[in-house]
């Protein structure tokens, strides 16, 4: 039974079409949706482990709330070939279904990035972020 578990997880990860991420200080909540929008997997990873997992996956759409940490992680995920969509937090909030927690926020990010009328923020380079801090 123990040898079957890793293959089930890997097959579920290969069917993921959209990922929602909620960034915390030391960890990242990961929710994977299939093409129909059903939740396939919910996990919590460290930031380093997340990049290992996404490197093994097929390129897919990844939705996150926009913040400085999201821009950094977004650049790394773009380098892996994924389609990264950053959204302002106030546009993601209406998609939270139940009590607010990190897992629910990650699912809301995944659902929000599937909306055709959603407004997205471009992933900024390090130079753009440093110029933005100078202007402030």
Image (cartoon, rainbow, N blue to C red):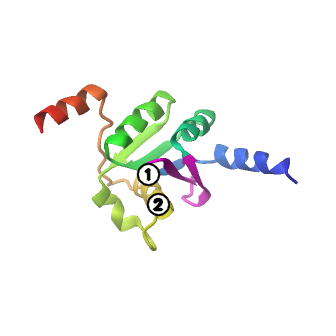
Q: Which residue is drawn at 52% across and 49% down?
A: 18
Which is nearer the eye, 122 or 76? Answer: 76
Residue extending farthest to the right is 1
Cβ–Cβ below 8 Å for labels 1 and 2?
Answer: yes
State left or right for residue 132 relative to residue 102.
left
Residue extending farthest to the left is 135
Tell me the quarter of the image containing the C terminus: top left
Q: Which residue is drawn at 42% across and 69% down?
A: 100
Q: Is residue 62 visible in this depiction of the protein?
A: yes
Q: Give the range drawn in magenta.
A: 22-45
Is residue 43 highlighted in magenta? yes
Per the image, label 2 sits on a secondary structure element best described as helix
Q: How crowded is mark 2: few (under 14 residues within 10 Å), some or many (20 or more)?
A: some
Q: How crowded is mark 1: few (under 14 residues within 10 Å), some or many (20 or more)?
A: few
Query: x and y percent of residue 45 in the render?
Result: 57, 47
Query: x and y percent of residue 43 in the render?
Result: 60, 54
The tally of labels here is: 2
Which residue has dot 2 on it?
102
Query: x and y percent of residue 97 in the render?
Result: 44, 71
Distance from label 1 to label 2 (Cα)? 8 Å
Which is nearer the eye, 39 or 103? Answer: 103
Residue extending farthest to the bottom is 98
Which is nearer the eye, 64 or 16? Answer: 64
Query: x and y percent of residue 34 in the render?
Result: 59, 53
Q: Residue 24 carries which label?
A: 1
């Amino acid at each position: 039974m123990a040898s079957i578990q890793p293959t089930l997880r890997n097959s579920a990860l290969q069917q993921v079409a959209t990922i929602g991420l909620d960034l915390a200080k030391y960890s990242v909540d990961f929710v994977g949706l299939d093409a129909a929008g059903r939740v396939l997997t919910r996990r919590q990873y460290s930031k380093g482990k997340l990049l290992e997992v996404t490197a093994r996956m097929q390129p897919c759409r990844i939705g996150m709330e926009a913040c400085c940490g999201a821009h950094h992680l977004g650049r790394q995920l773009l380098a892996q070939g994924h389609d990264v969509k950053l959204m302002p937090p106030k546009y993601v909030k209406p998609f939270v279904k139940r009590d607010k927690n990190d897992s629910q926020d990650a699912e809301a990010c995944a659902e929000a990035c599937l909306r055709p009328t959603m407004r997205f923020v471009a992933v900024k380079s390090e130079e753009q972020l440093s110029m933005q801090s100078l202007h402030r």
